[in-house]
Amino acid sequence: MSGLLDTSMVVRYLTGDPPEMAARAAGVIDSEEDLAVTDGVLMETAYVLTSVYGVERATVVDNLMTFLQKENIGGFGLDKGLLLQALLLCRPSGRVSFADALLWAAARSTNAKVVYSLDERFPSDGVEVRRGDTSVVS
């Protein structure tokens, strides 16, 4: 990886708005350079697309997945396949937040043994979720 992308680059690339900035973002993202995004950038991009641009959640997920499937784009410190799986957890509804899904991907990517969450909807596939008491979800 030779560079990290920030939210403004990803949002401009995905929205095409405004055209001049979108063209500059495309010049970087569509290049041959290996680039990466952090989970924070993915969360903020999802937030901006849904709240500022009013894009439907499923469309945001689809667009982020297409973006991540570009050969030169990777997740910073996170397994790309797990990032894609995490986004799929968010697609059907608001049941799993983008933040929780990306934390799930981080736990799986780093082999974290436990995630502590009070959220009953936190995805537990492949991670142990502890609620801060004696309840454990596996």
Image: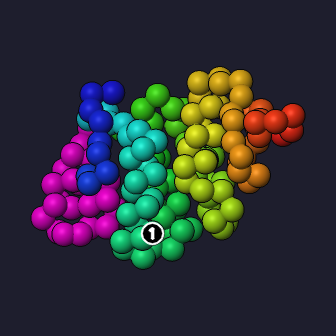
Q: Which residues are magenta?
A: 10-32
Residue at 42 percent across and 70 percent down: it is: 51
Place of residue 136 in the rendered image (x, y in percent of width and height, measured from the top left): 84, 36
- Quadrant of the image containing the N terminus: top left
Place of residue 77 in the rendered image (x, y in percent of width and height, measured from the top left): 46, 28
The amino acid type found where label 1 is placed reads Thr
**Chief SS of the magenta region:** helix
- Tell me the residue that label 1 is attached to: 50
Label count reads: 1
Asked whether the viewer can see residue 67, the reply is: no
Q: Picture quarter containing residue 23?
A: bottom left
Q: Picture quarter containing residue 103?
A: top right
Residue at 65 percent across and 24 percent down: it is: 112
Asked whether the viewer can see residue 12, the reply is: yes
Q: Is residue 48 magenta?
A: no
Q: Residue furthest left?
A: 20
